[in-house]
Amino acid sequence: MANNSDIAWKPIMYMVGTGVAGILIGTLIVAPMMQKRKAKKLAENKKKETAKK
């Protein structure tokens, strides 16, 4: 009875794997890019403020 379970594990594990991969991609690739972009924007704003004075 235990051998014939109704749960399809392959699609569940696929979804879990893609979710984990998405989180890793987000933290390792996208987050540093966003931080660089934000830092660049702040630096540009500081340059504009100092140029106005």
Image: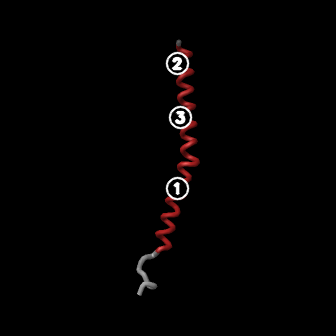
Q: Position of residue 48 (x, y in %)?
A: 54, 20
> Disc number at residue 38?
3
Question: Three-letter amino acid code at disc 3?
Answer: Lys
In the rendered view, tell whether residue 29 sits above or below residue 41: below
User: Callout 3: 10 Å neighbours few (<14), some, many (20+)?
Assistant: few
Closer to the chain start, of discs 2 and 3, is: 3
Lower sequence index among marks 3 and 1: 1
47, above or below 22, in the image: above
Q: Tag 3, which secondary structure?
A: helix
Q: Nearer the viewer, residue 44 or 39?
A: 39
Q: Residue at x 53, y 28 (%)?
A: 42
Are there few (<14), some (14-19), or many (20+) residues within 10 Å of tag 1?
few
Q: Secondary structure at mark 2?
A: helix
* Mark 3 to mark 1 CA distance (whole Å): 22 Å
Query: Where is mark 2, residue-wise?
Result: 49
The residue identified by callout 1 is: 22
Secondary structure found at label 1 = helix
In the orientation shown, which residue stands out farthest toward the bottom? 1
Assess whether mark 1 and mark 2 are in contact (beta carbons under 8 angstroms).
Answer: no
Task: Tell me the residue at 55%/46% (across/down).
Answer: 30
**In-front residue for pair 4/43:** 4
The x, y position of residue 44, in whole percent, is 56, 26
Q: Position of residue 34 (x, y in %)?
A: 54, 40
Amino acid type, residue under disc 2 in the picture: Glu
Count of numbered marks: 3
Compared with residue 12, is residue 31 higher up or lower down, i.e. above or below?
above
- Gap between marks 2 and 1, in whole Å? 38 Å
Residue 4 placement, left or right of 25: left
Can you say which quadrant of the picture contains the N terminus?
bottom left
Give the camera-side residue of 12 and 1: 1
Q: Which amino acid lies under the numbered mark 1 shown in the image of this protein? A: Gly
Q: Tell which circle, 2 or 1, labels the residue nearer the N-terminal end.
A: 1
